[in-house]
Image: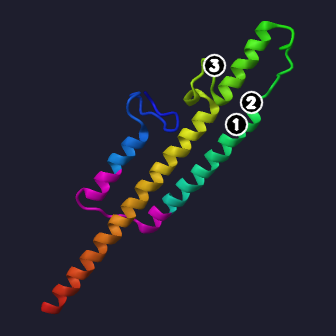
Amino acid sequence: MSNPETPNTGDPATPVGGVWKQVTESAVNGGPLSIDREGIKRCIKLCDEHADAMSALAERARNELRVDALGIGEEYFESAKRLNEKFQDKAVGGGQIDKSSSALGLFRAHQSYARDMKSTFEAVLRAYDEQEGINTENLNATGEDI
């Protein structure tokens, strides 16, 4: 079953957050790592901004897309009432529309994906800085013996 807060990779059992976790582990525990520190910092900032934008869009979807009436005769015609309900459900989930298939669910999924990417970039930067510190200490210690 897929998580409505996290976009999916195509396999309903594999949330994207799980994929980013694998990327993070590979970057942190894998072989050699060379990065552009300022580039990674910009990526972290962009992920944060994107997540914030998706959160704002999710709130707009919750507050603005769900309307009580479309003015198409919902009070008189059953078909108009059902159509109005489908639009409401598509906005925030409900009825036969799963929350993850709604506008609200989509924006929340993108928010979660951006946060996962940000966490990965932060972990890579931490691992790089830690290794850089170790390398510097080792070179300093070796330099004294030369």
Residue corresponding to mark 2 = 66
Q: Which residue is mark 1?
A: 61
Q: Is residue 25 magenta?
A: yes
Which residue corresponds to the image point at 58% horizontal and 40% vertical from the top-left? 108
N-terminal-most mark, 1 or 3: 1
Which quadrant holds residue 78?
top right
Question: What residue sits right under mark 3 in the picture?
Answer: 95
Which residue is drawn at the image coordinates 28% and 70% (left, top)? 131
Q: Tell me if residue 137 can be seen.
A: yes
Query: Disc 2 or disc 3, which is closer to the eye?
Result: 3
Q: Nearer the viewer, residue 38 or 116?
A: 116
Does residue 17 belong to the magenta stretch? no
Under circle 2, the secondary element is loop
Amino acid type indicated by mark 1: Ala
Q: How far is disc 2 from disc 3 in space, using C-alphas? A: 13 Å
Magenta residues? 24-41
Q: CA distance from mark 1 to mark 3?
A: 17 Å
Neighbor class of circle 1 (other Cα within 10 Å; few <14, some 14-19, many 20+) is many
